[in-house]
Image: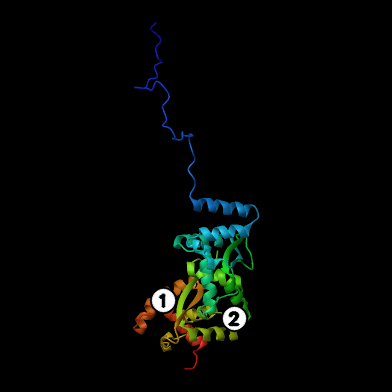
Amino acid sequence: MACNAEMEDTGVANAPTRPPTYRPGRRKPRGHRPVARPTREQLALAADRLDASGYPDSASVVRSVIEPGGWNLLSESSQQSSNLALTVDEKLKFDLRAAALKLQVSLSLVAEEGYQAVLDGLWVPHSAQSGGKRTRDAHYVRSVLNVRVSNDLRERVREVLPELSERVGFKVTESSIAVQWMMDELGVSRPEDLTVAMQLQARQSLRDYWVERAGQRRVTFQSVVEDGFRAVLDGSWDFGRVTPTRTHSESDPNSKLTVRVDTDLMKQIEAAVPRISGRLGRTVSPTILAMSILKDRLGEPAE
């Protein structure tokens, strides 16, 4: 008997009349499957959750790994490290992380470079401040920035802190070393800090001499340079009478010296530089002026 029933019109041309046949051994699809987030994003989310749950040290470990270059911390030689909790302004914390991300560097590795620079005698903090403010204003929001530093480096730096503090004339701490070095290296200013960092190069023997002299006089490089800049602007100091400093040598290499200067004062000096250069008949820059001021005010070691 012929079947007169008609198939329902689905509106689809060549619509299948039966379920598709699957080849033996082929897994049937299970519908929509969510796409996994990138590993870095998942770890960042895990770090945020650890922070929110009251485990900042664990969160620090995770963030150290996902920072650019952070995978190096997983090497066997980097296992002997510990967390260094730095109390800083929340904006400073954000700015440091943003700068590290932009430059593709790890904050932990940058901090370790600062420790090593102190031990090598190539750098010292330029003030007693770390990332917090002694006088907190309405804009200050206390936060903690965690970095990991080699236990060996931390132990060796702790041993030299008393001598270093006595030499520079103010208390130097692990926090001031880590925070100021990261700020200087990454080009980050303290929130509401109306100063700009000058990066100077001086012979190591000369820089060490200046550090000792500044400590003896209880002055900072910032106060010395700013006082000199004002003297240049008001004409009470003759820059032209300062002789050039002796250049570095293999036995006395250059080392970095960071000096912070009031932003407005720096703008005035930058505006005055062309006039000073024209009067002296040679190129002058704020850096050259700062070096000459330090030499004039703090002197030079005997040859």
Which secondary structure, mark 2? helix
Q: Toward which corner of the image does residue 125 lie, by quadrant?
A: bottom right
The local crowd at label 1, few if under 14, some if 14 to 19, many if 20 or more residues have their Cα within 10 Å, is: some
Residue 270 in the image, given as x and y percentages of width and height:
42, 74
Which residue is rendered at x = 46% and y = 35% of the image? 27
Count of marks placed on residues: 2
Q: Which residue is mark 2?
A: 164
* Above or below, comparing residue 233 to residue 59 in the picture: below
Residue contact between numbered discs 2 and 1, judged by CB atoms under 8 Å: no
290 vs 87, nearest the viewer: 87
Residue 273 falls in image quadrant: bottom left
* Position in image of residue 228 (x %, y %): 49, 81
Q: Nearer the viewer, mark 2 or mark 1?
A: 2
Query: Could you say which disc has been placed on residue 272 in the image?
Result: 1
Tell me the kind of residue under disc 2.
Leu
Residue with the most extreme bottom position: 303
| Amino acid of disc 1 | Ala
Does 301 appear above or below 76? below
| Residue displayed at 39% across by 16% down | 9
Q: Residue furthest front?
A: 24
Badge 2: residue crowd in 10 Å (few <14, some 14–19, many ≥20) = many
Q: Residue sitting at 59 percent across and 57 percent down? A: 59
Q: Secondary structure at mark 1?
A: helix
- In the rendered view of the protein, which quadrant contains the N terminus? top left
- Foreground pick, 65 / 258: 65
Whole-number angstrom distance, CA of label 2 to CA of label 1: 36 Å
- In depth, the one of 271 and 11 nearer the eye is 11
Q: Is 214 situated left or right of 246 in this image?
A: right
Q: What is the image's colouring?
A: rainbow
Taking depth in this image into account, of 69 and 271 the one nearest to the observer is 69
